[in-house]
Amino acid sequence: MATTTAPTKAPGRGDRWAGPGMLLPFALFYLVFLVGPLIYTVVAGFFDASLLKKGLGDFAGLSNYAAVLGDDEFWRTLGNTLWFTVLTTVPLVLLSLVLAILADRFVRGRWFFRFAFFAPFVLPSAVISLIFTFIYADQVGLAQQAAKWIGVDTPPSWLGDPDWAMISIAAATVWWTIGFNFVLYLAGLQDIPRSVHEAAAIDGAGPWQRIRHVIVPMLGRTTTLVTVLQAVASLKVFDQIYMLTMGGPDGSTRPSLQLIYDTGFVEGRVGYASTVSLLLFVVILLVSLVWFALVRRAEKER
Amino acid sequence: MTAIATPPVTEQKTTTAGPPRKYDAERLFNRVALGTLIAFALLWLVPLAWALATSIRPAQEVVTDPTNWFTANPTLAAYGDIFDAGKLPYWYANSFITSILTTVLTVAAASLAAFALSQTRFRTRRAAFVVLLAGIMIPGQVLMIPQFLALQSVGLLNTYWGVVLPQVPNVVAVFVFKQFFDGIPRELIDAARADGAGWLRTYRQIVMPISRPVISAVTIFVFVGVWNNFLWPLLVVTDPEMMTLPVGLTSVQDVFGVPYAQLMASAVLGAIPLLAVFLLFQRRIVEGIAGTGLK
């Protein structure tokens, strides 16, 4: 929020439109590509809209909602999406926190850690998927080989086994995206004043106590941000699943966004897909609002 | 990035004031920490290194001994195959053109809007800001159907504009710019205005020149985001010569099926431009991300 005070000079003629005028180009894009589509999605959910016909089609009332909510596949893809979100958010928050705290202790060589953890993040999902297609391949892949080295005689087919496919995709995602959270945590660590570290050290706190009782609590705001950003990003997963398993085996990794993609663009059922879109949007909104509410309460109690 | 870390300080403190046992604990902890970090960092480099190593192995060797890292006969044959089979130069060019176009439009529109929200005063300013911020909550992917229909109806499928336009309203970019503009001293703007400069001139000649750090941070994260976008170009582009690199790369997989040397060569070719961007602009990328919402 702006904290600057109002100008002392009375705005001259023509000034009144300067602000809105400069806002206009962005606002147009915003209206055409965000607000308009959102309204369309809400409306289309009440119609039997189809990709093949022009216009919205017949009014369908709540039948799309009834169909989606009664569709096992909707609940299964939502379940897959939530499972993926849990599988990625937990390690992506905890591991990046640990690695950032450790890396923050070493000035020399920090560029190396930043390169190792962050470089994968800038790569396109297509590149990540190509690499992990090979790593997870049966017989020839590195992952099965590594499992054999550590004594697993018959490693599972990482992407072919319904029990393992989502876990494998989540592991690849953790590898790919941890750098983003790592950097957010490093930035948070830079904001902790040195006097805090010194005071704790003079008080005789060892490194472990300092981390537990000083550093981690002071990173609370960053942790909230990282968790919400991560959960929202994971709920929108599509790329790597589409390229690694196409949602298989047997639909076990098909996320909500792929249900929207398949029903909307492959089958052309725009009304149905719009309803799923809106419901996914509501889930994403709820997750972030609930999380923020919880954090607010925790902060008040402290 | 050059901030001084705590260990040297605490070590000194503990050697002079604290009991020696503490000093040992500190040193031991540092060793364990460094060991853990290096182990993880190496683990993190394995997939990249393996992809690179595989891409320069002769295809025959990869088939007979896939998990070997080293080859006596390194070759760039797989790269040649990719260039011959795919439309790689097109994909590079398309990714480059769409990313540049989007970035220029986004930086221009978002910075102008942020300037208006930060420095000018008009009645609906606060409301406008809240409405824009709410846009952060809207996941773009959920809106892909109406966006697609809109572009289809004006005939922009399979065009650069079809890829570019929906990616321009980047609310986070406005937010980052506004954070920076809010920190510009009020007197600077007032002085320019008192000298008779219009708002647009103040924006162009006073504000933008001093905003280089934030401009480059936004430029890089928008550029990388557009370059890496997969789902949207996958929807609007079906013509192989109009595909962006990420979409084109997935079609390589269909052409070659299993040969992993070629797959890894395409992965490396897809990775190189962004790894270069990353190495050149490491600091700016990191600043850009750190600035997305922390402070």
Image (cartoon, rainbow, N blue to C red):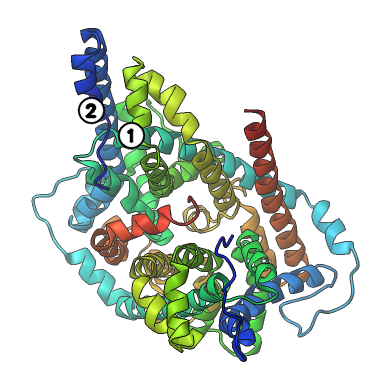
**Nearer to the camera, A202 or B1:** A202
Mark 2: few, some, or many residues within 10 Å (few <14, many ≥20)?
Answer: some
Which amino acid is tagged 2? Answer: Val
Residue A275 x %, y %: 77, 63
Residue B74 figure quarter: bottom left
- Residue at the image position 39 percent from the left and 46 percent from the top: A187
Disc 2 secondary structure class: helix
Q: Residue at x 51, y 38 (%)?
A: A164
Mark 1 residue type: Arg
Query: The residue marked by circle 1 belongs to what chain?
Result: A
Mark sitting on residue A138: none
Q: Foreground: A142 or A22?
A: A22
Residue at the far left: name it: B72
SS of the residue under disc 1 = helix
Report the number of discs.
2
Note whether A245 is above or below B206 in the view shown.
Answer: above
Q: Kindly indicate whether the residue at mark 2 contacts the one at mark 1 (C-beta within 8 angstroms).
A: yes
Looking at the image, residue B40 lies above or below residue B276: above
Residue pointed to by mark 1: A194
Residue A61: x and y in percent read: 91, 67
What x and y, as percent, mark residue A108?
A: 19, 40
Which quadrant of the figure has residue B283? bottom left
Question: Does B133 sit left or right of A199 as displayed?
Answer: right
Write down the quadrant of residue A85 in the picture.
top right
The answer, for residue A197, to whether it is visible in the render is yes
Crowding at dot 1, Cα within 10 Å, few <14 / some 14-19 / many 20+, comes out as some
Query: From the viewer's perspective, is residue A55 above or below residue A164?
Result: below
List the residue tagged with mark 2. Answer: B9
